[in-house]
Image: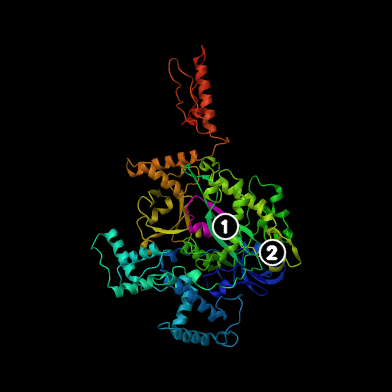
Amino acid sequence: MVSAPGRPGRPAAASGRQVKLGAYVTFQGGDWQVAAVAGASVTLTGENGQTASVLSSFLFADPGFTVGGSPRTGVGQWGLLESVPARERERALAWQRHIREIETGLPDGPGSTGVPRPEYDPQRTSMAEREQAKADELATLGWPRVSRATVRRMRARYHAQGLWGLIPRRKPSSATGQADERVVAAVLEALRRQRGRSKGTLKGLRELTGHILADAHGPGTVALPAPSTFNRLARVLADPLEHPGRPARTQTAAPAVPFTPTVALRPGELVQIDTTRLDVMAVGEDAKPLRPELTIALDVATRSVVAAVLREEGTKAVDAALLLAEMAVPHPMRPGFGEQLRLAHAAVPYDRLLALDARLEQAAARPVLVPETIVIDRGAIFVSAAFLAACETLGVNVQPAPPRSPAAKGAVERTFGSINSLFAQHVAGYTGPHVLARGEAVQDEARFTVAQLQELLDEWITACWQHRPHDGLRHPLLPKKALAPNEMWGALLGACGYVPWPLDGADYLELLPVRFHPITGRGIRINHRTYDHTLLNEHRGRPSPDGPGGRWEIHLNPHDVRQIYIRLPDGHLHEIPWIHRDHVHAPMGETAWRHIRNTLEKRTDREKHEAALAEAADQVLRRARPTTTAQPAPPRTTPQPEGGQPALSRYPAETADSLDALEAREQTEAGADEPGALTLYDADQEAELW
């Protein structure tokens, strides 16, 4: 029996697919029955008696592969869930667990651990009995108006529409009741200002809220509610640990809990994700020095950095969501990597892995795993709807760390320190761990762009970190020897095995952040950029059949805004380019675009202004390229004229390329002064000077 990757958010029959003897599968457009399973080989029998023997990895990678009529493995269309309040999403997820328990006996579906409760055991009870038992259970828990008919209706909606079918089509009630939204926002702001400070009383909090309302809307514009009403509102909005009247240091006031180390016994069982600033100055898209943000995913069982991404500023939820896919896809060999960095030379059973997944032939020596549980802090990018929806879609459990408990993610926190000490201090532009250890002009030492620093980091992880012995990795048969992350991965593969997880380009597009926009006669307008294509002709001015308010679902990569992806009525995402994409020859993010908009003042109409922005974007990205010299080049001067001061050159001398072009121009001009010299206009050479 071979397990095929499931699709969370779908009915239980689809999420627990197994290729076992007698199962019917769809392969290469035909229907087959599994006749034999021997290791990584699967023997199939067709309708006309023909037989075929294929590798399981090749079988799973087929675009039309399904088991028992279930949909293909991939990322679901979770974009519409962002328009649903959090309370309704949580209720839909609760219904999903109840429906799984009715159909399989276990809340987490087939393949999960545990024993079914007697009233939900499929071997002892019928479907009608289990539906009635679930209706009685929910009624006992206080769910309003839940009967067997309700349970049957929710099962039908789940099978027809997946998780989206479990969301009610009604406006949910608010925990704040009919309170003025301006008052609610002011109370939240007052609570934020009091966070971390000495605790006061509810009366003091009410006075602070009144000051905030007066500053934001004017004195007397918004009236404060009565003290009793305000106190109830504050109790609803305040965190229980930060409620006025409680101790300010609740973490130290509580008794210390016994220390329990985090244990993981197989790759991917527990993955910790976190973000921090790297102690290195880099060159940003606007050619200014900055400290990039580093987000890594650390596998606790092997201490392997399975994914790492550097961003200029404001790491977004899409970066964390794409980390999930990066863990499950082999890291390819990049230009410049040595032959010794191939996975074929690592301490892993390479031949057996290659038989299961042909993608590993060109892979670098880094682990490939499917995360089961991810430990996150309560950062905005990790608790966002985009990241949580991506985890739900890919079948990853999310475990938030307790507040003010950095030891809950001790492994990844310590890894950040190791990266700074083993890698960052050897890179030009190192800032040091604190301000006392910082140099005088660190910003002038920045030599690498964020993209170049990303390549250096990836190569260092492959060449150094994955082959460096770690004191926390010990094999039971070799307790005195510290193993490297790659060695530990190879040792654990023999116990847990390896199942390939094929993802294609469409799955990556589904993980991009979602926004909703109308299609006008000019195209799609996003942040002063216009996207247009002939695919939009038949949809201009028409509402979307599925989007909220008739707007269309748009997927946008914030790190490359030169194109967007729109979901048309056929259900697929289609690429729509920026009308000035040909003017920008490198990926451009929202940060560079915002810098250009703030620098270039709008002096023309919209179309000309957008074209000017595109030209400015290309020039900024060209100037952001680092110089090839170790030190900044001094300014060049023209020959000193007679009786005057030396004049600066009219041409820029900021890079080595511009210096070469200037020198060629000066030689040409010098030759023209000689008697009999004749020069021709060179368009390519002249273009280098602009």
Q: Is residue 309 magenta?
A: yes
Q: Is residue 561 magenta?
A: no
Query: Which amino acid type corresponds to the residue marked 2 in the rendered image?
Result: Val
Tell me what residue is drawn at x 49 percent, y 15 percent: 673
Tell me what residue is drawn at x 40 percent, y 83 percent: 145
Nearer the observer, 317 or 477: 477
**Residue 62 visible, this orientation:** no
Where is residue 493 shown, x and y percent of the image? 70, 64
Query: Is label 1 in a helix, a strand or a loop?
Result: strand
Where is residue 105 shown, x and y percent of the image? 57, 81
Query: Dividing the image into 4 quarters, which one contains the N terminus?
Result: bottom right
Where is residue 234 shown, x and y percent of the image? 35, 71
Q: In this view, does 354 lie to the left or right of 402?
A: right
Where is residue 311 shown, x and y percent of the image? 51, 51
Residue furthest toward the top?
675
Position of residue 182 relative to residue 131, above or below, is above
Tell me what residue is drawn at x 56 percent, y 61 percent: 273
Identify residue for label 2.
54
Query: Which amino acid type corresponds to the residue marked 1 in the rendered image?
Result: Ile
Nearer the observer, 545 or 657: 657
Q: Give me the disc on residue 296.
A: 1
Give how far apart the Cα atoms at labels 1 and 2 are: 37 Å
Residue furthest toward the left?
220
**In front: mark 1 or mark 2?**
1
- Stretch in magenta: 307-325
Position of residue 190 relative to residue 315, above or below, is below
Nearer the observer, 492 or 8: 492
Nearer the observer, 617 or 402: 402
Q: In this view, does 458 lie to the left or right of 281?
A: right
Position of residue 335 relative to residue 23, above or below, is above
